[in-house]
Image: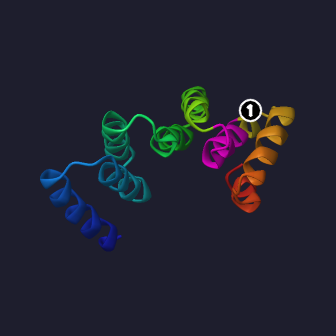
Amino acid sequence: MQNWKNVIREYNKAIVLHPTADLAYKIGDCNQRLGRLDKARDSYEFAIELDASNPQFVSSLGTICVSEGDYDAAIDYALDALDLDPNFSQALATLAICHGVRRNTEMYDKYSRLAIENGYSSEKIKKLH
């Protein structure tokens, strides 16, 4: 945990000097790993402000929503990410997980299959579902 905090500290120094979408995303990712969802959300939103064309940034907001149990918002973010890249496996997995939680078997199966076809781990989907 301390390593993640140190990494965030270094990234924060770097982003002040040279703000980039990738750095903002990395800060968000570290905060999400530490369970700091509000800080992660802020960083992901900043990454999107800097580069709205990256599906990873948009999809990551969806994963936060899944963690918070807000499946409607998670689906919206995942669909937005798929608008940017129709084969983006993380967004497809988010949709699978959300539909699995809602017991919509047909949609769960569809999005699980698509996520796996695009490189997402089947074990990870099952674990999160």
Q: Is residue 83 above or below residue 32?
A: above
Residue 126 in the image: x percent, y percent?
75, 55
Colouring style: rainbow
Q: Left or right? Give the position of 58 relative to 90.
A: left
Is 94 a magenta residue?
yes
Q: Which residue is mark 1?
A: 102
Where is residue 117 shown, x and y percent of the image? 78, 52
Q: In the figure, 31 relative to 101: above or below?
A: below
Q: Is residue 33 left or right of residue 124?
A: left
Locate residue 25, reporting x and y percent: 37, 50
Q: Which of 23/100 is in front? A: 23
Residue 103, relative to residue 31: is it above or below?
above
Quarter of the rendering occupied by the N terminus: bottom left
The residue furthest right is 106
Q: Which residues are magenta?
A: 86-98
Q: Residue at x 27, y 49 (%)?
A: 20
Q: Position of residue 103 (x, y in %)?
A: 80, 34
56 on left or right of 49: right
Amino acid type, label 1: Arg
Residue 97: quadrant of the picture: top right
Dominant secondary structure of the residues highlighted in magenta in the image: helix
Q: Residue at 32% x, 73% y: name it.
A: 3
Magenta stretch: includes residue 92: yes
Q: 25 or 42, which is in the foreground?
A: 25
How packed mark 1 is, by other alpha carbons closer than 10 Å (few <14, some 14-19, many 20 or more), is few
Judging from the image, what secondary structure is the residue with disc 1 in?
A: loop
